[in-house]
Image (spheres, coloured by chain):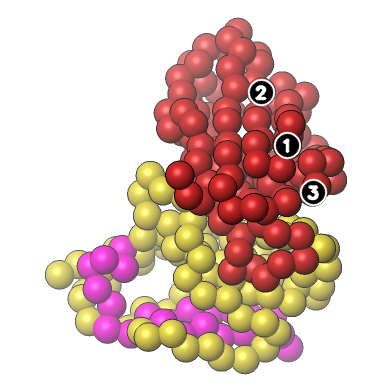
Amino acid sequence: QKEVEQDPGPLSVPEGAIVSLNCTYSNSAFQYFMWYRQYSRKGPELLMYTYSSGNKEDGRFTAQVDKSSKYISLFIRDSQPSDSATYLCAGTGGTSYGKLTFGQGTILTVHP
Amino acid sequence: ETGVTQTPRHLVMGMTNKKSLKCEQHLGHNAMYWYKQSAKKPLELMFVYSLEERVENNSVPSRFSPECPNSSHLFLHLHTLQPEDSALYLCASSQISGTVDGYTFGSGTRLTVV
């Protein structure tokens, strides 16, 4: 079993739609949960992170973590064509340095 | 220069060649990482250097040889690679015991082995 499972998609939605991206994980040591966005020919950039369970909102983006079910979600409201990218979920915890474990990534396309 | 810089951006090499990937960070971080990103697979952590000492080597074949001469520079030396080694190689840096929002990736080197 992979430590972090993510549906690779691809996911195609019209502009303005609400997008839901999801991951599951198996490592109980994870304390931080991250969502990265990766544009073509670029490295991943951190979009949001959450510590333990709960919700976090930043503009059109909301991250949710449910540690009891080991489920991570990212919601994008009023999606824009500029949101088209690969979205990677990741978890980390238990080491002093940042050992991140990633999901496969979901390819999202928002069409005008 | 700011952030994490990787060179070259693209590299094509034959299976008998020897080449090196370079990573430089200008963030004052003290941990550096090599990841491999292949199509349809999660990012795979290859090596971790913490305070210039290798602390993780995740069963990476010996044809990949990392080097961390100081806290700002990280190299990945490549020799006798296989076509399945073609991938995007990403470097990252962070501060030990720092917050996750300080973890920064470079733009990667796209490697093609022919």
Please name the amino acid that badge 1 sits on.
Answer: Asn
Residue B60 position, x and y percent, is 75, 34
At 83% across and 68% down in the image, what residue appears? A94
**Marks 1 and 3, how far apart at CA:** 11 Å
At 71% across and 42% down in the image, what residue appears? B71
Q: Which chain carries label 3?
A: B
Residue A59 position, x and y percent, is 37, 85
Does A41 appear above or below A103?
Answer: above
**Marks 2 and 1, how far apart at CA:** 16 Å
Q: Which mark is residue B53?
A: none
Q: Which of marks 2 and 1 is nearer the N terminus?
A: 1
Helix, strand or loop under label 3: strand
Q: Residue B70 carries which label?
A: 1
Residue that mark 3 sits on = B50
Q: Which chain is yellow?
A: A
Helix, strand or loop under label 2: strand
Range drawn in magenta: A61-84
Q: In which quarter of the image is the C terminus of chain A?
A: bottom left
Nearest to the observer: residue B100 or residue A10:
B100
Density class for disc 1 (Cα within 10 Å; few <14, some 14-19, many ≥20) is few
Query: Magenta includes B72?
Result: no
Q: Which chain is red?
A: B
At 59% across and 53% down in the image, what residue appears? B27
Please name the amino acid that badge 2 sits on.
Answer: His
On screen, residue B84 versus residue B52, left or right, reads left
Pointers 2 and 1 within a single chain: yes
Quarter of the view holding residue B16? top right
Does A102 appear above or below B53?
Answer: below
Helix, strand or loop under label 1: strand
Q: Which chain carries label 2?
A: B
Residue that mark 2 sits on = B77
